[in-house]
Amino acid sequence: MTLASSRPRASRVEAPVSSPPVSSLSEIHPPRRSASRARPGEDAALRRAFFALDEGILLLDAELRLLLCNPAARRLLGWVGAPPKRGLGLAALLEHASALAADDRAKLRDHCAALRAGGAQPDPESDAKETWVVLHDLGARLCSLGRHGIVVSFPAGGENGEAALRDPLTGLGNRRAFQAALAAALARPTTEAALLLLDLDRFKHINDSLGHPVGDTLLRLVAKRLRASLRAGDILVRLGGDEFAVLLPRAEGADALAERLVDLLSRPYLVEGHLANIGVSIGIALAPADAVEGELLLRRADLALYAAKAAGRRRFCRFHPEMDARAQARQALETDLRRAVALGQFHLHYQPLLEVASGEVIGFEALLRWNHPTRGVVSPVEFIPLAEEIGLIVPIGEWVLRQACRTAATWPEPIGVAVNVSPMQFADSARLLRAVGEALASSGLPGSRLEIEITENVLLRDGAETLAILHDLRSLGVRIAMDDFGTGYSSLSQLRSFPFDKIKIDRSFVSQIEAGNGGREVVRAIAALGASLGMTVTVEGVETEAQASFVAASGGHQMQGYLISRPVPSEAVPALLAASPAPRRMVDISSPAK
Ligand code: C2E
Ligand code: MG
Ligand code: MG
């Protein structure tokens, strides 16, 4: 259990809430600046309103002694005993607030002291400043009245209340509390601040594999570790999901803190009997160096976070101006890509697969191309990662399936087509299955002539669900190939998880065949492994005769590469087939071609 959940919530604390007798009002009423200014009846009306407010209010003088405290404040603070007397010091006052944890009290004290110090301006009347303090169970708004003191208000429940500012899972402030805190922190142009955006690495994996309750507990543990690493005055919130933010009231030391957090959060967690390993990526932006305005600071910290993730996660990155330029280029690419989908600027190229034993072309791999209006043909390596990130890969992938099947249906039997399917398409397995079924049905291509190529990342997703859909695809007669074999993290264990029909040995190994630094051994070993598991072994990226001879001698069943042909437009396929000896059959899974 975390600190936050073990402490009574303010709203649950039973505290005396009745209004004090009117005689005691004089004890806590502030001295009027000019009695003559009050109109008849106004004073009494103001008092009534003050006591009737749902919002808790503490009015402190410039020495941080109590002037006024309304019943709502006593209720929200969990005040025990008789109403506090005017003149009581803030520290003593907070000691009676049973709803506040010790660090909440310290935080409030520190913020009030800071506001008071900052409030000693030449013209305090015109320099009212406010700041938000996020406590465990409450949000507090501190407003400086200059030499007249400070108003501390605690919003009641509802739209603007404590619940609206709090993340119920971790007890930290939420995104809304953060925005208020950020705006308040940056209100003065001279403010120095550091914003750290944190995104947990591999959290989704824990959630998927160990379940959401374990994921929730893990998030609470993360919040606890974070809380323990911060100083009073630092603001910590959970922005949502596995994202947290830290706002430091200083720019100095942000890197050191980020480094410490990367180390601290990467240490193993014991969660309900499971050992969980996660990491964290952190993006940092500083005020005023990187931005003086909240939204821009947030965006720049986010760009830095993106860079930290792209650089391999488990690290922090500071914002650099060139990240802006990169983001703009990416934004432009995204706009173009969305337009490309709408305008149908894609087409497919087809690269032949050669059967080693017969020397026949037995099928083609469909490879996506984008005819960019100004950049010409853009490689999928450039735009597929972005399409995956923004979800466009799903409609694009469906178009590829339809188009590839329609084209392959015009080829002589049994020439087949292989289509690359992105891990993102597996997120909605029912949709993928439907797309494959419809592509086959509308083209009339038999399932046996379609091969789906997946990468190892597909299996890193929800394992059980992915395996189920692979089996469903199989039941349509479709074959499943593992692409780029050997480049992922856990190739061998994945081979056991699903009876793939084919493995495609990645080009990176083939290119090392002639270099004599282990490439030959790897290709030979994988070919033997695939064959012994009854899988067809295809070798990708064959560019030279020497590589082709080696692949043939190593027992590879099929090869693909520039030596045979580069990917070609569909119009060139008939010529390639005409040049190849007539194919006798498709790849036989049960006894792969030798
Ligand atoms: P992949 O599926 O491994 O496709 C093979 C890539 O290697 C293709 O690059 C192909 O042109 C290239 N290649 C083939 N033979 C040789 C060779 O001898 N030497 C060299 N240097 N390269 C060779 P391409 O077309 O640029 O595609 C790159 C990757 O983009 C593909 O790798 C695949 O992962 C992805 N991709 C392509 N089309 C699609 C698609 O429709 N959907 C999805 N999700 N991904 C696609
Ligand atoms: Mg492929
Ligand atoms: Mg490949």
Image: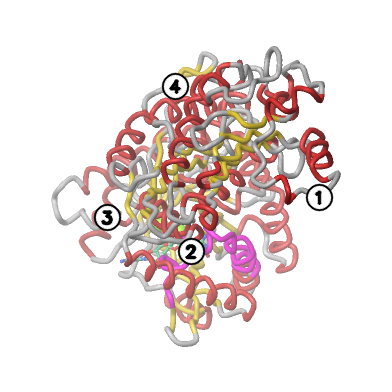
For the residue labelled by badge 2, is the local secondary structure a helix, a strand or a loop?
A: helix
Q: Are marks 2 and 4 in contact (CB under 8 Å)?
A: no
> Which of labels 3 and 1 is toward the front?
1
Q: Name the residue at 69% across, 52% down.
A: 433
Residue, disc 4: 269
For the residue labelled by badge 1, is the local secondary structure a helix, a strand or a loop?
A: loop
Quadrant in the rendering for residue 165: top right
Residue 510: assigned label: 3
- Classify residue 497 as left or right of residue 58: left
Q: Is mark 3 within 8 Å of ligand 1?
A: yes
Q: Are marks 3 and 4 in contact (CB under 8 Å)?
A: no
Q: In this rendered view, identify the residue nearer to me: 372 or 238.
A: 238
Residue 384: assigned label: 2
Residue, disc 1: 39
Which of the two discs, 2 and 3, labels the residue nearer the N terminus? 2
Q: Is mark 2 within 8 Å of ligand 1?
A: yes
Q: In this rendered view, identify the residue nearer to me: 363 or 75.
A: 75
Q: Is residue 395 part of the magenta span, yes or no? A: yes
Give neighbour class at mark 1: few <14, some 14-19, many 20+ (Cα, 10 Å).
few
Is residue 481 depicted above or below 403 in this figure? above
- Classify residue 113 as left or right of residue 392: left
Question: Horizontal and vertical percent for residue 511?
Answer: 24, 58
For the residue labelled by badge 3, is the local secondary structure a helix, a strand or a loop?
A: helix
Question: Horizontal and vertical percent for residue 558?
Answer: 40, 56
The amino acid type of the residue labelled 1 equals Arg
The amino acid type of the residue labelled 3 equals Val
The amino acid type of the residue labelled 2 equals Ile
